[in-house]
Image (tube, rainbow, N blue to C red):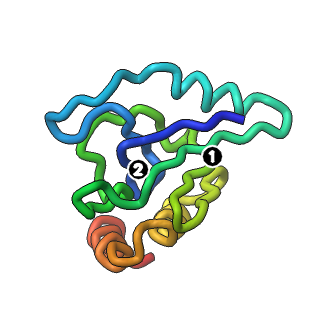
Amino acid sequence: MSLNSALEVDLTGQVNSEAIGSGYFGAVGGQVDFVRAAARSEGGISVIALPAIDKHGHSRIVARLSGPVTTARSDVDVIATEHGIARLRGLGLRERVRALAAIAAPEHRDDLLAQAREQWGEL
């Protein structure tokens, strides 16, 4: 099992653990290595955990990342917030969007889904 944190996760499952806009918070470190190692282990699972909102009340599950992709969506297994877990392994784009919106802070869910529909059409 691997457990890592993130600054934000987009609705497709891409993970940013480095920077928000011009604010740099940390390097890639070993996140990708641990995520991939867990996936290769028999019965392994990788979890990216983050609070649903930041200290200013902004959603940390976002329609588009404001910083770099640290971990690609193809490597992501599980995303967890205080509102639940989204098991992304094997899901298509629309399923991922719905799963991640469901664990976002309730006050941000409608807006996230509206942004997703704008970008990808009906979900």
Residue type pointed to by label 1: Asp
Q: Is residue 57 above or below residue 108?
A: above
Q: Is residue 111 left or right of residue 43?
A: left
Residue placed farthest to the front in the image?
55
| Residue 20 vs residue 119, the one in the foreground | 20
Residue 123 vertical position relative to residue 9 in the rendered view, above or below: below
From the top left corner, tell me how far across and down residue 112 is, in percent: 33, 70
Pointer 2 residue: 9
**Which quadrant would the N terminus be assigned to in this image?**
top right
Q: Is residue 44 left or right of residue 46?
A: right
Hey, what amino acid is under mark 2? Answer: Val
Residue 99: which quarter of the image?
bottom right
Q: Secondary structure at mark 2?
A: strand
CB under 8 Å between discs 1 and 2: no
Quadrant in the picture for residue 74: top right
x and y percentages locating residue 25 in the rendered image: 28, 30
Q: Residues within 10 Å of mark 1 (few under 14, many from 20)?
A: many
- Which comes before the other along the chain, label 1 or label 2? 2
Q: Position of residue 63 (x, y in %)?
A: 32, 59
* Location of the C terminus (image quadrant): bottom left
Q: Which residue is pictured at 37% across the width and 39% down the height?
A: 16
* Residue at x 41%, y 23% (from the top left corner): 28
* Residue in the foreground of this view, choosing between 73 and 80: 80
In the picture, measured across the screen, residue 79 lies left or right of residue 22, that is: right
Examine the rendered structure and indicate whether residue 111 appears above or below residue 21: below
> What SS does tag 1 mark?
loop
Residue at x 26%, y 63% (from the top left corner): 57
How many angstroms separate mark 1 from mark 2 (CA)?
Answer: 13 Å
Residue at the extreme left of the image, as rendered: 22
Looking at the image, residue 4 lies above or below residue 115: above
**Residue identifier under label 1:** 77
For label 2, the crowd category at 10 Å Cα-Cα, with few meaning under 14, some 14 to 19 and many 20 or more, is: many
